[in-house]
Image: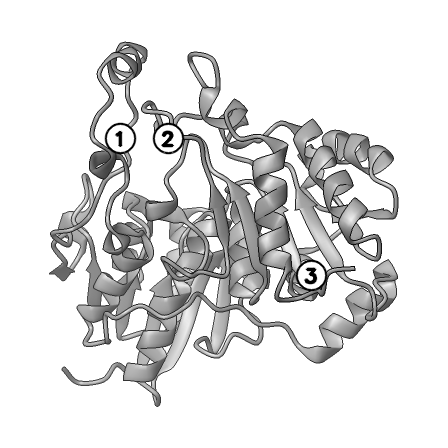
Amino acid sequence: MTPPRRLLIRGVNWLGDAVMTTPALLRLHERFPHTHIALLSPAKLAGLWPAHPAIHETLDFAPRESVLSVARRLRRQAFDTALILPNSPRAAFECWLARIPVRVGYPRRFRSWSLTQVVPDRSDRVPMTKPTRSEIQQRLQHPPPLAERRPPPRAHHLHDYLHLAAALGANPEPLPPRLAVTEAETAEVRARFQLHPDTPWIALNPGAEYGPAKRWPATHFTQVAHQIHRLHPRVRWIILGGPNDVPIAEVIHRSVPHSVLLAGRTSLRQLMAVLGLCEVVLTNDTGPMHVAAAMGTRVVVPFGSTSPELTGPGLPGDPRHRLVRADTPCAPCFLRECPIDFRCMNGISPEMVGQAVLEALAPRLPTE
């Protein structure tokens, strides 16, 4: 195909999903090195993209900005091609109203008419289906085969975005998700939050915006910190989270000596820099998990209601990360709240996760 002159990427709306799009963005930049690539992003995620090697320009929109307002701004930019990553009708409609000549995306309800190139779903795509309570009970009584509960690596959602990029001629083979901050940003974060460079830092991220089914018990984070401290007394702790996580982060902060409370205190760029400074991040399956891995930091994650094969951190199968789960036949269910007894998370002990943290920490810190 003729290379686009000005390519718009309509970005996704959730932090973790946005990080999973970065391999596709890198492949597009590789395929079109002389194309101006702009990303249209929700304002809350715009901080991801400064200094990213695949993006030349970021356009953002406010939470309540109308479709017509966004489309008018896009029309002034004279894009010739749009790659629409989200599945929503709005995302495609914005590009149609903006009169972008080539509009590429997946066929979804109420929007296929607005695309000029409809990309069929890949054959190995695995949807996230949510079972009913009775279906969960059925799983417990008659456990499905393990292979049905653990899809192959190519089922990972980053392949959905690579498949779309391939429709424009990009290489569909995966790359590790990648984010970047500047040295100046890292230095500013060290100074602002007093993160000494000679101190080994481990971050604890006990929240999860999606819902309680993703949250490993907060007291377990504290127990892991105490377990690690006994073996590595030089380690210090950073307690992270968004504004809604501040109460639980404060409880952990009071229980973990030598910890720094940053929950609710960082911008997205500052969070990226902090995560990049850590040796290991112990986190639930949430946006900062993906950010940490994309910043090159090892992560340890208790997985319950979700599937690491579909939305795990980093490149699928990356041995640097430790993804811990209990063998419960009802997981993954992808529900926001557990309708039974939360066995998928309660079955993951602090000892299991503590051992995983030690394994992740071992290459970074000698035994003391």
Q: Are marks 2 and 3 in contact (CB under 8 Å)?
A: no
Q: Is residue 110 above or below residue 299?
A: above
Q: Nearer the viewer, residue 252 or 288?
A: 252
Quadrant of the rendered structure where residue 261 is?
top right
Residue at x 71% of width, y 60% of height? 274
Query: Which x, y percent locates residue 62?
Result: 54, 50
Residue 201 visible within the image: yes
Query: Which x, y percent locates residue 269?
Result: 66, 62
Q: Is residue 136 left or right of residue 194?
A: left
Q: Is residue 348 above or below residue 120?
A: above
Q: Nearer the viewer, residue 151 or 35?
A: 151
Q: Is residue 181 above or below residue 114?
A: below
Q: Is residue 300 above or below residue 144?
A: below
Q: Residues within 10 Å of mark 1 (few under 14, many from 20)?
A: few
Amino acid type assigned to the residue bearing label 2 in the image? Phe
Which residue corresponds to mark 3?
278
Q: Residues within 10 Å of mark 3 (few under 14, many from 20)?
A: many
Amino acid type assigned to the residue bearing label 1 in the image? Thr
Q: Is residue 206 left or right of residue 166?
A: right
Tell me the element at label 1.
loop
User: Looking at the image, is mark 2 or mark 3 nearer the viewer?
Assistant: 3
Q: Nearer the viewer, residue 48 or 38?
A: 48
Q: Are marks 2 and 1 in contact (CB under 8 Å)?
A: yes
Residue at x 24% of width, y 21% of height? 143
| In the image, farthest residue toward the bottom | 34
Q: Is residue 260 left or right of residue 221?
A: right
Query: Which x, y percent locates residue 267?
Result: 70, 55
Which residue corresponds to mark 1?
129
Q: Quadrant of the N terminus?
A: bottom left
Tell me the element at label 3.
loop
